[in-house]
Amino acid sequence: MNVVAKKSLGQNFLIDEKILNLIVGLGNINSNDIVLEVGPGTGNLTEKILKKGPKKIIVVEKDTILSMNLKKKFNKDIIVINDDILNYNQSYLYKKKIIIFGNLPYNISTQILISWIKINNLNNFCKKFILMFQKEVADRILAEFNNKNYGRISIISSWKMEIEKIIDIDPNSFFPRPKIKSTLLVFKPKNKFYKIKNPRNLEHITNIFFNQKRKMIKKPMQFLFKNYEEVAKELSLDLTLRPQNLSNLTYYKICSYYEKLFKKT
């Protein structure tokens, strides 16, 4: 492979044929589907997606040289966007029920995921996300309460998404070889989820709780609510618990109460 991967962009290109075939198969792509691929790199997965015959393939690649190579390799068969996915305006896709594939850059993977989860009418935006993460990050996404890995990303991810772990991927499946394992996850939008007016409020609340994750929840509750004891009683909260001891649902209820009390939108 003649491409030099850039550490600054978290580049590790998937080269394992079995894993590539597994990933594209999870998409169940048909001729009406619009596919968005984030971080296509050298186009190894793109090539296999193209063979499935979707209606349209859009790839977003931050690296200018890789973007130019992709345009040469695929010509007009795909749409190549040379941009950072966090800056790329995806609003024109919000009602298209797209399929998203991504070998997400390790350094910004959770930012990307949360940006999608925050989209209103997520069911209309996508059918599913098929994403690779650093294993450590995937473990945090999948963690349930009372687990040491449980935290903000666990709570926010599971708010509107059903998440399935598919497989851990060995470092030898990539070039250059990363030092750690990766994990392949599939996310599907839930039909029913707890109603929160603004996901930023959930981000705010979980940030306050987990910035002091070793302390009892009395402290963040005091910070959020002047009448914290009344709120705790109403929500049946034990103030001696720690943030990792509260379920996802409990955080959604705290957020909803916060929005109602302070008329947050």
Image (cartoon, rainbow, N blue to C red):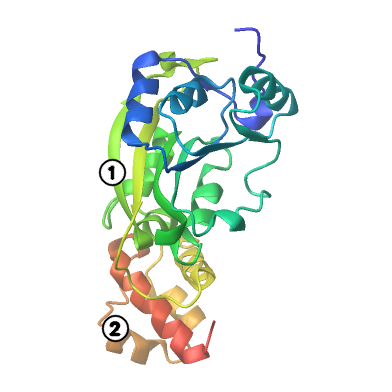
Determine the residue positioned at 34% across, 51% down: 188
User: In the picture shown, does residue 74 fall above or below 137?
Assistant: above
Which numbered circle lies on residue 235? 2
Q: Is residue 80 above or below residue 194?
A: above
Q: Quadrant of the N terminus?
A: top right
Distance from disc 1 to disc 2, alpha carbons, whole Å, reads 30 Å
Crowding around mark 2 (Cα neighbors within 10 Å: few <14, some 14 to 19, many 20+) is few
Sequence-wise, the earlier of marks 1 and 2 is 1
> For the residue labelled by badge 1, is the local secondary structure a helix, a strand or a loop?
strand
Among the 4 quarters of the image, the one containing residue 255: bottom left
Residue 125, given in percent of the width and then of the height, sits at 47, 56
| Residue ID at (43%, 92%) | 227
Type of amino acid under label 2: Leu
Type of the residue with mark 1: Glu
**Residue found at x 55% / y 15%:** 176
Question: What residue occupies the far top of the structure in this picture?
Answer: 1
Location of residue 11 in the rendering, given as x and y in whole percent from the top left corner? 59, 26
On screen, residue 162 above or below 135: below
Mark 1 or 2: the one toward you: 1
Query: Does 27 appear above or below 193?
Result: above
